[in-house]
Amino acid sequence: QAQLVESGGGLVQPGGSLRLSCAASGRIFATNTLAWYRQAPGKQRDLVAAITSGGSTDYADSLKGRFTISRDNAENTVHLQMNSLKPEDTAVYYCRETGRTVYDIEYDYWGQGTQVTVSS
């Protein structure tokens, strides 16, 4: 069964760092994109960063320089390194995988989300 398992969220003080991870399993992909989104209370879910199976990356403009996305293709795992965290980074962070299997079937999966709270 296809699933995305996120880890690494928690409480951190302003200026601190966290590293989120998301492991995708249950499918054999031809190409895919792994991404992180976040949703703060009362706000829409927005893209944080994305990385393709070819290694191309995309970031929300406001987060460039503080957040770094990376992936391990062998493990189909994506990481989000978050530095210099601010209270406004507080949100539930969601992992998303979109792609096409080796059988040419498109898919789109979301993880359950992991809470990140930045507070002193």
Image (tube, rainbow, N blue to C red):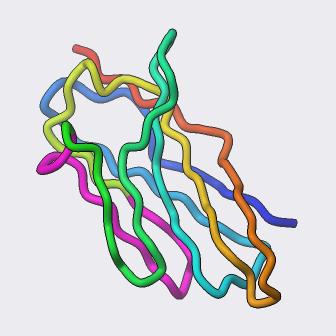
Looking at the picture, does residue 38 appear above or below residue 49?
above
Q: Is residue 16 left or right of residue 71?
A: left
The x, y position of residue 36, in whole percent, is: 46, 49
Looking at the picture, does residue 92 appear above or below residue 64?
above
Q: Is residue 17 left or right of residue 84?
A: right
Looking at the picture, does residue 62 appear above or below residue 70?
above
Seen from the viewer's position, the closer of residues 52 and 71 is 52
**Residue, x 41% and y 73% (percent of image)?**
71
Seen from the viewer's position, the closer of residues 65 and 46 is 46
On the rendered image, what quadrant is the C terminus found in?
top left
The x, y position of residue 19, in whole percent, is: 35, 51
Looking at the rendering, which quadrant does residue 3 occupy? bottom right
**Residue, x 29% and y 52% (percent of image)?**
59
**Residue, x 46% and y 65% (percent of image)?**
78
Q: Which residues are magenta?
A: 63-79
**Residue, x 26% and y 46% (percent of image)?**
82
Residue 73 colored in magenta in the image: yes
Looking at the picture, does residue 80 appear above or below residue 32?
above
The x, y position of residue 98, in whole percent, is: 62, 63
- Farthest right residue? 1
